[in-house]
Image: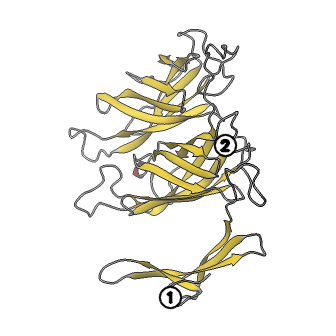
């Protein structure tokens, strides 16, 4: 591999800055045909002496949508994209890690879970659309490698930060169908800027981690003239998961925590065959959330709703997704304290969870 007009074997990585650009190091790449059609490489320091990173798994992407492809190309395996099953649809969460997270204390980073919808195409392209738990929008696509790795690098905060990691698709895991433990998440410090973030203005410029997990999502079967109602139709929590026999019998719970709450809450609820939730009383031994409303979207596995936040005296909204592999759901809400709040009261991202009883 050669770079530039001089065909140099290395390329300098430079960050544009004033009064002068900053050298970040040097990258060397090599196309290894004999070793299995992959790219290897090294990342060295600004002097070009110390190696602080290696690349050894940049595999050749080989999935194609063509019928009867010639080797080494092949179609996406049914374990990842099953036209008769999930149709390449997944729900995903960016779950909060325990504090301290790389030295960042609990109220200085989101305690809710980010979420998204993932789609795998017949050509091996994987896309995600969703939100991180601080409200940042996530929209990204990249291709699967032959090892079923999905590299993620998403610039955030006007390129002042990013989230990155390598997701492995593996349906044999008991809790997930695709995962990346310890995905790196960087957010810049805006405390010295004219325009500060209302939520976590100090950011985490040193980085924190969040666990990414995805689960295949199969929409509940709907009865039609051509398709009779199945004996056990299931709900958004998964095929075959029974619904409550009536609107007074609890078969799921919905909980809230953190985000300016002095008391965590949990409510029982009845989920019917159409995935409509009826909120019931507080779960035994727990406090209930006032004004709780929850909606599940059968087509996508989405979850949304609201509850009355005692610190505000008014409703706050939450969003999330169902995770069928564990028959749970999770998401987040954002608490922005009112001007009348006590000095030092901070804005926070709280968590919302649901699960089958």
| Camera sees residue 185 | no
Q: Residue 278: which disc? A: none
Q: Residue 166 in the image: x percent, y percent?
A: 61, 58
Q: Which residue is mark 2?
A: 176
Q: Is residue 275 above or below residue 210?
A: above
Q: Nearer the viewer, residue 140 or 267?
A: 140
CB contact under 8 Å: marks 2 and 1: no
| Picture quadrant where residue 63 is located | bottom right
Q: Is residue 119 above or below residue 11?
A: above
Badge 2, how many Cα within 10 Å: few under 14, some, many 20+? many
Colouring rule applied to residues: secondary structure
Please name the residue shown 45% across and 39% down the image.
Answer: 332
Q: Residue 258 in the image: x percent, y percent?
A: 43, 39
Badge 1, how many Cα within 10 Å: few under 14, some, many 20+? few
Q: Nearer the viewer, residue 267 or 232?
A: 232
Q: Which residue is mark 1?
A: 5
How many numbered dots are placed on residues in this image? 2
Please name the residue shown 39% across and 35% down the image.
Answer: 261
Q: Nearer the viewer, residue 52 or 237?
A: 237
Sequence-wise first label, 2 or 1:
1
Q: Is residue 74 above or below residue 258?
A: below
Element type where label 2 sits in the image: loop
Q: Residue 3 in the image: x percent, y percent?
A: 54, 83
Q: Nearer the viewer, residue 179 or 349?
A: 179
Please name the residue shown 51% across and 43% down the image.
Answer: 116
* Disc nearest the viewer among 2 and 1: 1
Please name the residue shown 53% across and 83% down the image.
Answer: 11
Q: Is residue 129 left or right of residue 233?
A: left
Q: Is residue 283 left or right of residue 136?
A: right
């Amino acid at each position: 591999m050669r770079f530039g007009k001089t065909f140099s074997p290395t390329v300098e990585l430079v960050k544009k800055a004033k009064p002068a650009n900053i050298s970040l190091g040097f990258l060397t790449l090599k196309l290894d045909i004999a070793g299995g059609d992959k790219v290897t490489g090294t990342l060295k320091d600004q002097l070009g002496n110390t190696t602080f990173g290696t690349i050894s798994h940049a595999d050749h992407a080989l999935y194609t949508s063509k019928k009867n492809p010639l080797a080494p190309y092949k179609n996406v395996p049914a374990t990842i994209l099953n036209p008769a099953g999930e149709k390449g649809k997944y729900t995903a969460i960016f779950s909060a890690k325990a504090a301290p997270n790389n030295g960042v204390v609990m109220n200085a980073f989101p305690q809710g879970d980010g979420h998204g919808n993932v789609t795998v195409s017949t050509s091996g392209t994987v896309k995600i659309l969703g939100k991180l738990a601080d409200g940042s929008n996530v929209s990204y696509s990249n291709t699967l490698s032959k090892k079923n790795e999905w590299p993620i690098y998403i610039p955030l905060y006007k390129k002042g930060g990013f989230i990155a990691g390598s997701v492995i698709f593996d349906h044999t895991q008991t809790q997930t169908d695709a995962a990346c433990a310890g995905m790196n998440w960087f957010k810049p410090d805006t405390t010295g800027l004219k325009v500060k973030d209302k939520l976590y203005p100090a950011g985490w410029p040193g980085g924190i981690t969040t666990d990414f997990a995805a689960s295949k999502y199969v929409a509940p079967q709907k009865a039609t003239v051509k398709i009779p109602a199945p004996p056990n139709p299931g709900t958004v929590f998964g095929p075959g998961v029974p619904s409550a026999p009536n609107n007074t019998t609890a078969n799921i719970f919905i909980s809230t925590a953190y985000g300016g709450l002095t008391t965590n809450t949990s409510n029982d609820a009845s989920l019917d065959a159409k995935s409509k939730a009826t909120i019931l009383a507080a779960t035994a031994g727990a406090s209930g959330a006032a004004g709780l409303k929850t909606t599940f979207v059968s087509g996508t596995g989405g979850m949304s709703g609201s509850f009355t936040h005692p610190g505000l005296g008014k409703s706050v909204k939450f969003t999330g997704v169902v995770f069928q592999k564990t028959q749970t759901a999770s998401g987040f809400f954002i608490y922005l304290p009112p001007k009348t709040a006590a000095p030092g009261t901070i804005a926070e991202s709280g968590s919302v969870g649901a699960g089958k009883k």
